[in-house]
Each structure stands twice: as C-alpha cells, then as structure tokens.
Image (tube, rainbow, N blue to C red):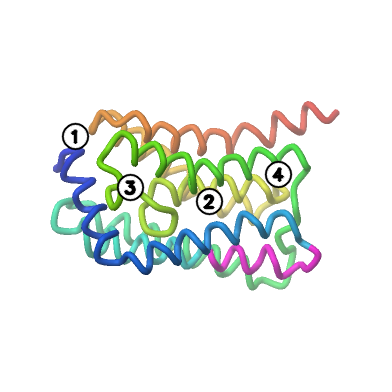
Amino acid sequence: MLPYSLDVYFSVIARMNAELWWAAMLAVLAATLVVLSVADERSGWIPRLAALTLALGWLITGTVFYGDRLEPLFFGAHWFQWAYTAQAALLALVAVAPRPGLPRASPAAVGCGVTLMLVAVLVMPGTEAVLRDGWPEIRLVGLAPEPTLVFTCGWLLTRTPGWPIALLALIPLAGGAAAGHSALALNWGLDWVVTAAAAALVLLPTLLAQHSH
C-alpha cells in the first residue's frame, strides 16, 4: 500500500510541471540530445557527457520530486531522495573516471536501448496524455522517477557490459522493483514498463551474447 492515491500522485506531477514548465522543456530537450548522442560517438567524451546529463536528471528528480513535492505525502520520500542522489553521484563518477570509459555496446543492444529511451521520452508521456488529462498531468524524463528509470535502463543497454555498467544498474534495478509495487498499489499498469525495463537491463545482454555465438 501507498499513502496516496493515483489521482493524488498525478496531481503532484501536474503541479510540478505547471510550476516548472521551463525545466520540463529543458528536460525533454536534454533527453532528446542524449538519444541523438548514441547515434554519433566519434569522441569518447560524448557518452561521458550523456552520463553527466543523466546524473543531473537523477539529482533533480531526487531533490525536486522526492525531496520537495512528494515528501509531505510519503514517509519514504527521503530514502528515495538519497537513492536518486547516490545514483547521480555514481553516474558522475563513472563519467569522469579515466578508465575504462563507457564504450558502445553491440548494434542489437544499442537498438534495444534506444527503443527503451524512446519509450521513456515519447510513449509513456503520450500514453498518459491520453489516459489522464493531458498536459501538465504527464511524467517526463529528468523530473519524474518512472520515465527517468526507463530512460536510464535504455541508455545503460547501449553501453558495453562491465563493472561500471553493473554498478550503475543496481539502483535502477531496485527502482524497477519499487515501480512494480507502485503498479499494484495504485492500479496503474503503465508502471510495469519500468519493471520490464529493469528486467531487460539484466536479461538482454546475456540473451544477445548467447545469440551472437
């Protein structure tokens, strides 16, 4: 159970978007640039900049959404805030670490990852615009947790598996489990997309590696 209803949850989202409309526009722009960055990685700093952009999105989501907007309604908001802040710090550290960098994954993995990123940027808010009352009652990457989680899982799939990616996947995997609980508690099936994205982050690299042999 959660101490708020689906309508209350989306009312928080709506007020946040309406008051921070300029931040919502910048968040959508930044997410779009990160998607486009996957297509052109001639410089090794491109994925590093993408990781820093993701770090900023996690920090804003943790601070603004959990630390400010949801805190009066949810006793666990501060725990989520610290988890999101920790993920932001991990993304920033991996981005600036001298080695091993963030090399691009196989074309099949990149395709799956970009698909998830587009789901987070376009499909999830578009679906909510239809099922709810349209703007501002939609969740956006970099401001709301669910699309930020899906987007991050997608981007991590575009990177070659290794210890940095495994480290960066831990909190999104926990977030996927939390989203499954939210989907049940609020009876909002769209949140299962987050759980599916987290599962894909675990399963797809193994399946694609087996298929390539």
Q: Is residue 43 above or below residue 165?
A: below
- Which residues lie in the magenta part? 42-53
Q: CA distance from mark 1 to mark 2?
A: 26 Å
Q: Residue at x 33, y 47 (%)?
A: 138
In the visual, does 70 lie left or right of 143? left
Q: Nearer the viewer, mark 2 or mark 3?
A: 3
Residue 20 location, quadrant: bottom left
**Which residue is tagged 2?**
152
Looking at the image, is mark 1 or mark 2 earlier in the sequence?
A: 1
Name which residue type carries label 2.
Thr
The mark closer to the camera, 1 or 3, is 3
Name the mark nearer the viewer: 3 or 4: 3
CB under 8 Å between discs 1 and 4: no
Disc 1 versus disc 2: nearer the observer: 2
| Residue 46 is covered by the magenta coloring | yes
- 15 vs 146: above or below: below
Q: Which quarter shows the C terminus?
A: top right
- According to the picture, the residue beneath numbered tag 1 turns out to be 1
Q: Which dot marks residue 138? A: 3
Which residue: 57% across, 34% down?
Answer: 200
